[in-house]
Image (spheres, rainbow, N blue to C red):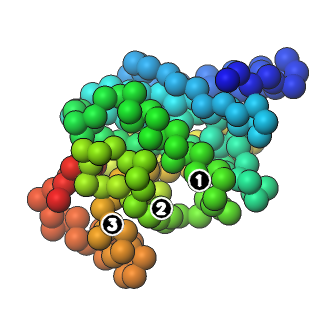
Amino acid sequence: MKIEFLNENERFTFDVRRSILLGAYMAQWGMPEYRVVLSRAESGVYIEMYLFPDRGGVSRFVTIGLSNTFHKSGQPVASEWMLALPSDLGGEKQERIFHYFADLIAHHIEKASSSSVPLVMGSSALAPDNWNAKALLIDELRGESDSLEELKVGDEVFPLLWAVPITEKEAAIILEKGIEDFDEIFEKSDYSIIDPCRP
């Protein structure tokens, strides 16, 4: 499905947004390998998702255009997302991850009333079958360059947020005890927080 921009100026504005954000991402992660477009003409949603392949054992899926989108409630999303996974993508194909990432974004736009973090999405049947981490945490960016924490496009300033698959048990810890307890558990853990197949 293709979205029709209302006028040539809107297309130009998005092209500028893409140039700025893609430049910021490429400065850290090199060249992207794939792009997938999520568009819904009836709701005015147009979001590009990029895959930056294995760099230091980490592959990253990242959005451009989510920051220019509104929740169904009318509140601006005002953030972009980055999903970091081990280079083997948790045993899944990149197409499967793109579909899952698009589902998460669509759910967030439709169901969330704001983009305040930390935000926990419960366990989902849409998560890849090979993963134990079927819930999701949206939080402040971690383990990346400080230059990506706040993105700027013209007068707009918004965060690049970290989308991290978590287990149902980890989601319960965050909801009951807070993000600090979750962080402490991972500081002592032998498992990588980006590994969606962790027990």
Within the image, what quadrant is residue 10 found in? top right
Marks 1,3: beta carbons within 8 A? no
Q: Amino acid at mark 2?
A: Met
In the displayed structure, 101 sits above or below 123; it is above
Bin the neighbour count of mark 3 within 10 Å (Cα to Cα): few under 14, some 14-19, many 20 and up: some
Give the left or right position of residue 87, taking residue 65 as reference: left
Marks 2,1: beta carbons within 8 A? yes
In the displayed structure, 169 sits above or below 27; it is below
Point 79% across, 36% down: residue: 42
Residue 108 image label: 1
Give the left or right position of residue 117, taking residue 182 as reference: right
Residue 121 image label: 2
Q: Out of 127 and 158, give the one closest to the viewer.
A: 127
Alpha-carbon distance for marks 2 and 3?
A: 10 Å
Q: Quadrant of the C terminus?
A: bottom left
Of labels 2 and 1, earlier in sequence is 1
Disc 1, SS: helix
Of labels 2 and 3, earlier in sequence is 2
Point 47% across, 57% down: residue: 138
Alpha-carbon distance for marks 1 and 3?
A: 18 Å
In the displayed structure, 160 sits above or below 123; it is above
Residue 173, horizontal then vertical, whole percent: 33, 76
Bin the neighbour count of mark 2 within 10 Å (Cα to Cα): few under 14, some 14-19, many 20 and up: some
Residue 70 visible in the displayed image: yes
Residue 168 image label: 3
Of labels 1 and 3, earlier in sequence is 1
Point 27% across, 48% down: residue: 131
Disc 3, SS: helix
Residue 26, horizontal then vertical, whole percent: 45, 25
Bin the neighbour count of mark 1 within 10 Å (Cα to Cα): few under 14, some 14-19, many 20 and up: some
Q: Amino acid at mark 3?
A: Glu
